[in-house]
Amino acid sequence: MAHEERDVERMYSTHEVVAKLRRLADALEQDRPFRIQVAGERIRVPARAQFSIEHERGHDEEEIEFQLKWPLEPESAEDPDSDALV
């Protein structure tokens, strides 16, 4: 199955963000892949993903984005049972 293009932004409660970030930090620290659910879709993030932090400032607001990037692989290379849901 081909990956469809997607660009979504979803607001989460502080409680939900804390839980996601805590599990994300654990996976990063252990150098292991994980899954995260964003706006109803489960996404596999490999351990080799590159992490960056972006800061933007405009006239009336500021934004910080925590970003993970990785190249897409064929789905047959994924092991869905090996990753924790974040």
Image (spheres, rainbow, N blue to C red):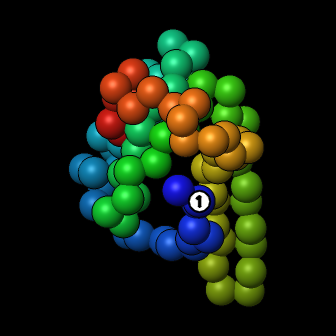
Q: Label 1 is placed on what type of residue?
A: Ala
Residue, x 74% and y 86% (percent of image)?
Answer: 59
Where does label 1 land, which residue? 2
Image quadrant assignment for residue 64: bottom right
Q: Residue furthest top?
A: 30
Toward the viewer: 8 or 71?
Answer: 71
Q: Position of residue 3 (x, y in %)?
A: 58, 60
The C terminus, quarter of image = top left
7 up-or-down from 35: above or below? below
Q: Tag 1: Cα neighbours inside 10 Å, few (<14), some, or many (≥20)? A: few
- Decide if residue 3 is on the left or right side of residue 41: right
Image quadrant assignment for residue 38: bottom left
- Decide if residue 62 is on the left or right side of residue 75: right
Q: Position of residue 7 (x, y in %)?
A: 58, 72
Toward the viewer: 86 or 13?
Answer: 86
19 up-or-down from 14: above or below? above
Residue, x 36% and y 65% (percent of image)?
Answer: 39
Residue, x 53% and y 56% (percent of image)?
Answer: 1
